[in-house]
Structures are given as C-alpha cells and as structure tokens.
Image (tube, rainbow, N blue to C red):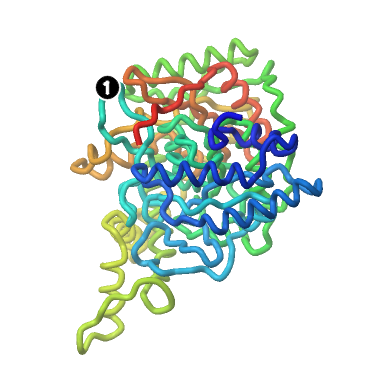
C-alpha cells in the first residue's frame, strides 16, 4: 500500500476491515512521520507506548468483528483535552506538571470507539490566539510554504498543532476546539477540513475552558467524509456537562449524498468587506458558482449586526476567560512561583500568575476583569450580550426565510508568516476571526472546506454555516462543495 500515514480515515478504516493492513502498522507509520517532523513542532507530548498498546487492542477488536468506525485509527489530541496520566497543559506554563487522573468525555468516547492516541498537539495558550504563537512550547509551523520562499508560516490558531499535524500526514485526524474560529481558521490555512458543531453537540467536560458559552470541540480531518466519521464518535449527551444537548446523534456519514438540488444557499452582503484580497473574493464567487452548478439556489441575504460581532466577541470571550482562569492560582495544581521570605498568599497569587500566564492570556484576563468590574458591567458586558442576541436573531430570520446554509470565506487571507504580526496592534490579529466569530456567538455549526490556492500557492478555504443541530445536512452541502472544488493539493515536504 501507499504510505499508510497519508490515508484518510475512511480509506484506513476500509483497509483495516479488508485485512489489507493493521492498526499497528498504521500507528507505526504515523509515529515514524512524527519522529521526522520535529521542525513542525506539532506534537508536544508524545505517547508512543499508549498508541501501540491501543493499536494492539484495536487489532483484536477488528479481528473479532467488534469494530466501530474509528477503531484502530491513529489520531492526535489537542493539548486542551484532559487525558489520564498524560500532560495536559493547554500550552501554558501555569499547568506545567499537571497530569489529570481522569479523561475528558470526548477523548474517552474516542478511546471507547477504538481510536489510537498518538500524543498531544500544540496550540495557542488556553486557546487564546490565531497563529499558534502564544504557546509555551513555541510556535507550531505550517507545512505549507509560499512559492519560492522559505518563510515559516503560521498554521493558524488556536488549533495550529492539530491543523499542521493533519496537513503533514503525521496523524489521520485530530481533535480541535473552536471558540471564535479556532478549528475553521487553521483548517483553511493548512488545506484541511474542520467542523465546529452546534454549541452543545459535543461535551465540554474535561476540556480546559477558555470561554464557556462559546467553546465547542470538533474534528480536524483530511476530507469531509472523515469529519462525518469522527464527529459521530465525538458527539453525544453528557450529563456531566449542563450545556450538553440530549439529542440523538445522526449517522453523519450516511447523510453525505452530496445532492444539494433545490437547496437555498445564502451569500451575506455584510461579509464583503473593504480591502478583501482579490484571491478571497474570487474564491467566494467561484464557490457560489460551484454550488449553483450542483443545483443549489444562490440568494443574497443580510446579517445586519455582523459589524458588531467582533467587538462584542472580544468583550464576552475575555470576560468568561477572566472568570475561568481565576482557578489557576498555584495552590492546587500546576506551576507555583518561588516566594521570597515574608511573602504571603497575595504575593504567591501575583507571582504565580505573572510567571504562569503569557502576554496574550494576561491581556485578555485584564480586559475581561475590566469589563466585568463595577461601573463597566452594564456599559460593556451586558451590552455585548444584547448584541449577541441580535446576531443570533439575524441568523434565525435568514433560516426562517428558507435558507439552508450560508457560504462565506473562512479567513480574510492565506496563512501569514510567523512573526509578521508581532509588531501589529493586537486588534489586527483579532481580525483573523472576522468571518468565524458570528457562528460561535449564535451557537451554530460551521465547516471550513479547502477550495483553492492563492497566487503564492497557499491553500484557501470557504466556510459553510448551517442551521442549529443540522450538522448532517451541513456536511452533505460541504461534501458537494468539496467534490466540485476537487482540491487535492498537498504541501511539498521540506521538514
């Protein structure tokens, strides 16, 4: 067979069922690829012993005919997910040395389904970032390069390590989390597929929290079919998560008909922004044409409160982060600062948090504390919550008019160089989320699909936004777009 680590989940699953290969062989191929890809800095905690042990168990299940779809398939786990006995730091110094004695619900479900964990993946610290440059482990690196250049590029964030690992065939798929675009933006930057499900579709229990009303886990994969397969294993009601929806999980893969005849696809006029690169605008127009040719009706829609989404998001998300991160104080677990003689508990908190949190996390905690403080709560936080309600209503109104999905760009540009934004105003970096944050604010499902290359040879993605709880229908529309685009480009191996 071909290099086993380059297989899709679907192809690897089918090969395992036919007896053409084994989970052990698949896992060893991925482990070799990981060992040779240190330059990407994608995997930050390696677990080869666990991987080979689970592969052996999976081969026994497959031989016995007891094999769910994910059984025997090697995947990477974002460092935000707590994994029993394996470091789970959320890419932060403050959680250095933390070894959970429990498993997050999602990783437990994947383990139960027979998936093989290869290790933990790099990310922005506490998922705060759009370029994977805030990690305590150092930058993750995009396997793609601009034509004729050696500049190291960002894989996006916060799920940058996941995106890089999947794009470079270090694993067959990976978990990610998405608070304002952290699955979809890195997927677009690296030429892979990433889906953020409806808020509440996947359990958040055991996933280190950034902003609890926005965070949602999802799969990052090589194809839409792979996303359907892996999402089915990740979803399900969890009584330990009060926001988890008690709804049946559809057979997402069976829904991939790709038949979108008669579907109504909306194009929001507010997303046509001043200064949008010509490559992005053409990609969007081409994507609409592809869906029209596949039988969909393309209609113009309006989402009038879109312009308020980014500022409202950067009030709500830091506010929730400041509350969630208050628990990291150096008392119970993780890093504790060395104290001077005479220091008390206040000095311990101050020094520990100053040493443990990076600059971006400190910035967001300070912003969040400010907008929640007496005298500013109503002026900022409550006003942002009201804007969020209006954004959600915009989508509800559009869907009530019969629109089945909404097509937008996934990112305002292709991947940029690591360090190229280091001197920019932080708001410039936040603009990377301009097309994605509305989906989180409204709790909707969204998927990024690679659909083309820019003039420098870098991948570009389009985003489809679906109705709440209708991931199956959204995946089918994404499958139609994927088939029409025919994106098969891969990064040239330089690492």
**Foreground: 186 or 269?**
186
Q: Is residue 471 left or right of residue 194?
A: right
Q: Is residue 1 above or below residue 440?
A: above
Foreground pick, 413 / 88:
88
Residue at left offset 52%, top offset 25%: 407
Q: Residue furthest left?
A: 423
- For this orientation, the residue located farthest to the right is 65
Q: Is residue 442 visible?
A: no
Residue 104, located in which quarter of the rendered image? bottom right
Q: Residue 4, percent across and down?
A: 57, 35
Q: Is residue 4 left or right of residue 44?
A: right
x and y percentages locating residue 73 in the rendered image: 63, 44
Residue at image coords 44%, 69%: 98
Is the N terminus in the top left, top right, bottom left or bottom right quadrant? top right
* Badge 1 element: loop
Q: Residue furthest top?
A: 293
Which residue is at a point 35% across and 25% down the rendered structure image? 273
Q: State the residue position of label 1.
A: 148
Q: In the image, residue 236 lies at what x, y percent? A: 69, 51
User: Callout 1: few (<14), some (14-19), or many (20+) C-alpha neighbours within 10 Å?
Assistant: few
Q: Quadrant of the C terminus?
A: top left
Is 333 placed above or below 322 here?
below
* Total numbered labels: 1
- The residue lying at 34 percent from left, 40 percent from top is 141
Residue 483 picture quarter: top right
- The front one of 92 and 245 is 92
Q: Is residue 479 visible?
A: yes
Provide residue 315's location: percent of width, then percent of height.
37, 51
From the viewer's side, name the closer residue of 77 and 460: 77
């Amino acid at each position: 067979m071909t290099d086993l680590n380059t297989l899709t989940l679907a192809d690897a699953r089918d090969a395992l069922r036919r007896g053409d290969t084994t989970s052990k062989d698949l896992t060893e191929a991925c482990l070799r690829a990981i060992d040779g890809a240190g330059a990407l800095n994608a995997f930050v905690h390696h677990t080869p012993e666990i991987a080979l042990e689970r592969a052996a168990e999976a081969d026994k299940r497959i031989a016995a005919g007891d094999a769910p779809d994910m059984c025997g398939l090697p995947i990477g786990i974002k460092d935000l997910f707590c994994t029993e006995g394996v470091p789970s730091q959320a890419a932060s110094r403050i959680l250095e040395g933390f070894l959970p004695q429990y498993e997050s619900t999602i990783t437990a479900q994947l383990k139960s389904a027979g998936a093989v964990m290869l290790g933990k993946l790099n990310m922005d610290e506490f998922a705060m970032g759009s370029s994977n440059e805030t990690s305590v482990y150092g930058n993750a690196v995009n396997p793609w390069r601009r034509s004729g250049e050696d500049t190291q590029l960002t894989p996006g964030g916060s799920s940058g390590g996941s995106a890089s690992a999947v794009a470079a065939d270090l694993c067959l798929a990976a978990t990610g989390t998405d608070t304002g675009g952290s699955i979809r933006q890195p997927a677009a930057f690296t030429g892979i597929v990433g889906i953020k499900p409806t808020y509440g579709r996947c359990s958040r229990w055991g996933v280190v929290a950034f902003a609890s009303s926005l965070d949602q886990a999802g799969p990052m994969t090589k194809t839409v079919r792979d996303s359907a397969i892996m999402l089915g294993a990740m979803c399900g009601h969890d009584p330990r998560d009060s926001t988890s929806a008690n709804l049946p999980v559809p057979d997402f893969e069976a829904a991939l008909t790709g038949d979108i005849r008669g579907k109504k696809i909306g194009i929001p006029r507010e997303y046509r922004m001043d200064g949008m690169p010509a490559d992005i605008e053409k990609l969007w127009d081409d994507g609409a044409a592809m869906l029209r040719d596949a039988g969909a009706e393309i209609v113009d829609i309006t989402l009038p409160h879109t312009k308020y989404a980014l500022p409202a998001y950067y009030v709500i998300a830091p506010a929730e982060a400041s509350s969630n991160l208050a628990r990291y104080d150096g008392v119970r677990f993780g890093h504790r600062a060395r104290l001077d003689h005479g220091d008390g508990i206040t000095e311990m908190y101050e020094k520990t948090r100053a040493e443990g949190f990076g600059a971006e996390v400190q910035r967001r905690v300070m912003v969040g504390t400010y907008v929640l403080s007496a005298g500013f709560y109503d002026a900022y936080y409550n006003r942002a919550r009201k804007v969020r309600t209006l954004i959600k209503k915009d989508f509800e109104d559009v869907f009530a008019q019969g629109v089945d999905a909404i097509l937008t760009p996934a990112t305002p540009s292709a991947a940029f160089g690591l360090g190229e934004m280091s001197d920019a105003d932080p708001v410039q970096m936040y603009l990377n989320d301009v097309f994605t944050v509305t989906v989180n604010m409204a709790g909707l499902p969204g998927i990024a699909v690679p659909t083309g290359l820019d003039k420098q040879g870098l991948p570009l993605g389009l985003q489809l936004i679906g109705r709440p709880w209708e991931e199956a229908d959204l995946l089918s529309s994404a499958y139609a777009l994927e088939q029409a685009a025919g994106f098969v480009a891969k990064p040239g191996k330089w690492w």
